[in-house]
Image (cartoon, helix red, strand yellow):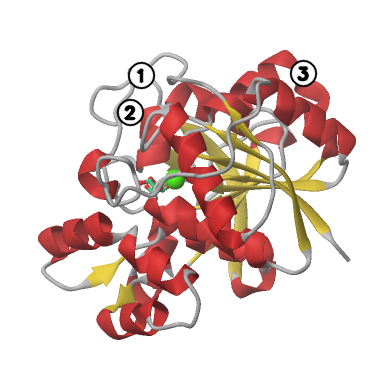
Amino acid sequence: MTKVFLIDTDTASDDAIALMMAMRAPDVHIAAITAVSGNVDVQQAASNALYVAELCGVNIPVYVGAAKPLQQPNFHAYWCHGPDGLGGHGFRPERTAPEAKDAVEAMIEAISANPGLTLVALGPLTNIALALNRKPDIVRDVARCVVMGGAFCGGNVTPAAEYNMWIDPDAAHIVLRSGLPVELIGLDLCHGEAILNANEIAQLESLPGKLGQFAVTCNSQARQTYFEQNGTDGLSLADPVAMAIALFPSIATRWSEHYVEIETESELTRGETVVDRHDVATDERPACRKRFAWNGRLH
Ligand code: BDR
Ligand code: CA
């Protein structure tokens, strides 16, 4: 049976691989891609998504969304993904352009037209929060909301916070309180065995066709940054981990459901994902309980 996806993305190099995974999945129809500001500015994010769609030979409408977080300033991740988010190799769409309609409106329409769809969030949650503010009852029509975000054992942009949550904690707060059936795929799942080592990168690069080569080339800056930070050749691909679980939920073997809040105020811990792992809090609102995929190292 065909599954309908709506993908919200701040399209940089790991988002690009996640998009390719969904675009190549035989049982997935992508109703729309909505671009959001994050790793790169929102116009670049839309352009990168269009480039990936052209490379995959699919025609998917791409909409431009929020140009900045709800309250925080922009802080693009060029240091990690290169000047255009795709390693700075000049990848640009040749034939296609973004749709004129605003991404938030397009998101509301796509969800209403496809009850039961899977919403996959690969960037800051700004667009989704704006859509919820405009039409809160869209939550009824979303079967799964798979979010790459959060870090429960240390962040990647501050000691406390993962990038997507840190950039727009106010949006994350709205989304987590909305009643959407959120599945949080945190950074912790993207370490360890999820890191592509040099051999695996070489295998990917040598796959027939253009996609494997592109996946490695567009991540050249991410690979360099990983080396500088860790002293080994490898690639940490957060968004593809989330997309893998969106496509094949059973690969996440450990799930648990807890209350969660995102810190929005503190200078020290802004964007921290506060998970009530030991269920010490009480809250009457079931909407606040969220599912988490864990990796084995935490137990
Ligand atoms: C997240 O931030 C971005 O750099 C990646 O695209 C991913 O969505 C990981 O913290
Ligand atoms: Ca991303």
x and y, in percent, of residue 201 in the image: 33, 77
Position of 257 with respect to 225 (left or right) is right
Tag 3 or tag 1, which sits nearer the N-term? 3
- Residue at point 65% right, 41% down? 289
Amino acid type shown at disc 1: Glu
Q: Label 1 to label 2, Cα distance in Å?
A: 6 Å
Amino acid type shown at disc 3: Lys
Residue on which the image places disc 1:
265
**Label for residue 135?**
3
Q: Nearer the viewer, residue 75 or 216?
A: 216
**Label for residue 270?**
2
Position of 26 with respect to 62 (left or right) is right
Query: In which quadrant of the rendered view does residue 214 lie?
Result: bottom left
- Residue at point 46% right, 20% down? 67
Position of 55 with respect to 119 (left or right) is left
Tag 2 or tag 3, which sits nearer the N-term? 3
Q: Quadrant of the N terminus?
A: bottom right
Is 162 above or below relative to 225? above
Badge 3 local density, few (<14 within 10 Å), some, or many (20+)?
few
Dot 1: what SS? loop
Q: Quadrant of the C terminus?
A: bottom left
